[in-house]
Image (cartoon, rainbow, N blue to C red):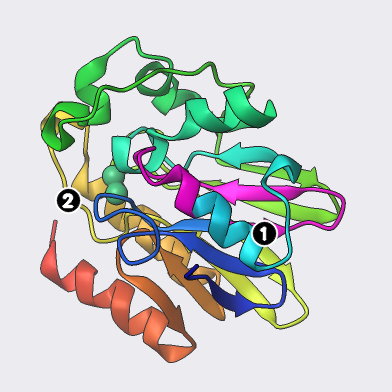
Amino acid sequence: MSKATTICDGVYAVGGPDLSRPEDAYVYLVDAKSCLVLIDAGVGYGNDKIERNIRAHGLEPAQVWYVIATHCHIDHIGGLHLWRDRYASKIIAHELDRAGIEGENDSLTAASMYGVNYRPVKVDTILSGEQNQLRLGETDFNLLHTPGHTPGSISVYIDTSEGRVLFGQDIHGPFSPSWGSDIREWRRSMRKLLDLEADFLCEGHAGIYRGEKIREYIEGYLNRYPE
Ligand SMILES: [Zn+2]
Ligand SMILES: [Zn+2]
């Protein structure tokens, strides 16, 4: 049986520990009408399940024209090559995490920690700077640079008829010098996320938070990792 979760109209969780593969970060799907957009791709081993979950919503994996990689860790990017090879999906990521995604520096991906043999991909759209807006399909995607967990971490938000949906993938950390983590930058990034006053938070490992729970969740981590 396929598992698939609707977060709000046109936004779904299609991969994750309970949906595709235990090592996977959550994989979110946005139906942008003329195409589909995936936020992260999991480690790769659960990709067939992710595709099944997409079909369970009556949507076609071949319509995934874009995959946004929130940062260069293997539990988010291991499956990118499958999307590129099967469906010619375009990869979008920030320039400061490009080296990990394109295979120039293996330690940045943490692949050995997961025992995954990473197959690098080229980034088609390289983001730079503080904030970018991309219109993909019929949806405006706001891509906010939120460094800290990694230097090129981004958070993505869209405004829907049901409210603002924020994809904030690794809010909880962890932090390591081997990936270039920076707690001070991370704290600044978390304040940017709080300022967005999102209605839905789709987190990479913790799942979905709504309304006031979002502030509680983020502030909980700010208290846990003081400067
Ligand atoms: Zn992660
Ligand atoms: Zn990570």
Verify whether residue 45 appears in magenta.
Answer: yes
In the rendering, at what x and y percent does residue 219 appear?
28, 76
- Identity of the residue furthest to the bottom in this view: 212
SS under mark 2: loop
Whether the residue carrying mark 2 lies under 8 Å from ligand 2 is answered with yes
| Relative height, residue 69 to residue 143 (above, below) | above
Are there few (<14), some (14-19), or many (20+) residues within 10 Å of tag 1? many
- Which circle's residue, 1 or 2, is located before the other in the chain? 1
Report which residue position mark 2 lands on: 174
Report which residue position mark 1 lands on: 30
In the rendering, at what x and y percent does residue 214 appear?
40, 80
Taking the image as drawn, is residue 197 in sight?
no
Q: Residue at x 51, y 29 (%)?
A: 82
In the rendering, at what x and y percent does residue 206 appear?
30, 69
Q: Which residues are magenta?
A: 29-49
| Relative height, residue 104 to residue 19 (above, below) | above
Q: Quadrant of residue 149?
A: top left
Between the C-alphas of marks 1 and 2, the distance is 26 Å
Q: Residue at x 52, y 70 (%)?
A: 4
Q: Residue at x 44, y 35 (%)?
A: 79
Tell me which amino acid carries mark 1. Val
Tell me the number on the disc at residue 84. none
1 and 2 marks in contact (CB < 8 Å): no
